[in-house]
Image: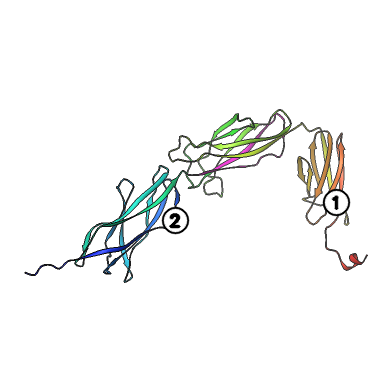
Amino acid sequence: MAAENTMTAKVDEYRIELQLLNNEVDTGTDITLKGKLSCSPIADLSGTTLQIEDQDGALVESIELTEFDGETNETGECIVKTPHQPGAYTWLAVCPAHESAGISFEEVSTSFSFTVKPHSMRVVVWDTPLTIECGKQFSIKFGVKCSSECRPDAWVLAVSDHDGNELARTTLSDDPWPDTAALYHAEVELTAPDTVGLYAWEARAPATDLKIPHTQCATPFNVRAVATPECVLTVEAIDRENQTPVEGARVVVHPYRSFTDARGLAEVRVPKGEYKLFVSGKNYFPFRSDNEVKTDMKIRAELTVDRELTDADIYT
């Protein structure tokens, strides 16, 4: 009886490709693996399984070689979950020893590394009033978004003042802000400082007591406390040439701002004092007026059209 003829082949190339933008990924998210295997002598190894093992040697996933181009065997894409604990990881891709078409293949493996990081969080602030009277209540909207678009599990948001004192703590909504993918929000009632000034406050999303590790995030925002208004300053914006109202002109009496209506009028409530008034509109030269406001007053701002010079203008 003739002895069975079995050849021993050496696998001389084995590569796992991680289809990632970089080698840092969030905890508990997906990574895509794709394996390639070539050997000498060349052989079609379709149906052979590659095993993905974690840092402890536990089997994470098995990937089957499904494609052979005459030289190299390839797997399809395989999606696996990253660990939930942040850190640096080295896993193995293993091709176990096996026989195929009378050829004996030894076990081979290759390692690949990646870093798992906590999910990052971002805090956004909007609808902040330009000015708030000293000691008055006001509300601001806040939103928090996770880099992996996690849904909140009793996420909280805290607001602190310029001295680091916590002013408010609230739980974020279960549903995202309209037309956003994962911006979870809350509206917070606050009280302005009792003294006139510009204050730097902070909104932060604490990262403690979360099932999946997240980084704490904080965003500063300004609160401008002003004295109680005593006078109404009415501004009328007029087109100098046509003597018609200018709608939508921007009116600035620092730190107060407004826009003119269809009648070209804007009202700004201010404390008594000296102010520089600026009025600007699209395609108009800015208007400036220095005034001392002691009582209610009205200022007419005639705006000149900003246009290119004609030949006649140049010659004259």
Please tell me whether residue 134 belongs to the stretch shown in magenta: yes
Q: Which residue is mark 2?
A: 20
Residue ranking furthest to the left: 1
Q: From the image, state whether disc 1 or disc 2 is nearer to you.
A: 2
Q: Relative to residue 315, is residue 265 depicted above or below?
A: above
Q: Name the spot of residue 312 as percent of width and height, x first.
A: 90, 67
Q: Residue at x 92, y 67 (%)?
A: 315
The part of the chain drawn in magenta is 119-144
Going by the image, does 52 lie left or right of 209? left
Q: From mark 1 to mark 2, how far is it between C-alphas? A: 59 Å
Going by the image, does 309 lie left or right of 126? right
Instruction: Characterize the local packing of mark 2: few (<14), some (14-19) or many (20 or more) Cα atoms within 10 angstroms.
Output: few
Q: Which residue is mark 1?
A: 238
Q: Name the spot of residue 97 as percent of width and height, x first.
A: 23, 58
| Tag 2: amino acid | Leu
Q: Residue at x 78, y 33 (%)?
A: 229
Residue ranking furthest to the bottom: 70
Q: Name the spot of residue 42 as percent of width and height, x first.
A: 28, 69
Going by the image, does 217 lie left or right of 261? left
The dominant secondary structure in magenta is strand
Residue closest to the eye, 205 or 107: 107
Q: Residue 93: which quarter of the image? A: bottom left
Secondary structure under the numbered disc 2 in the rendered image: loop
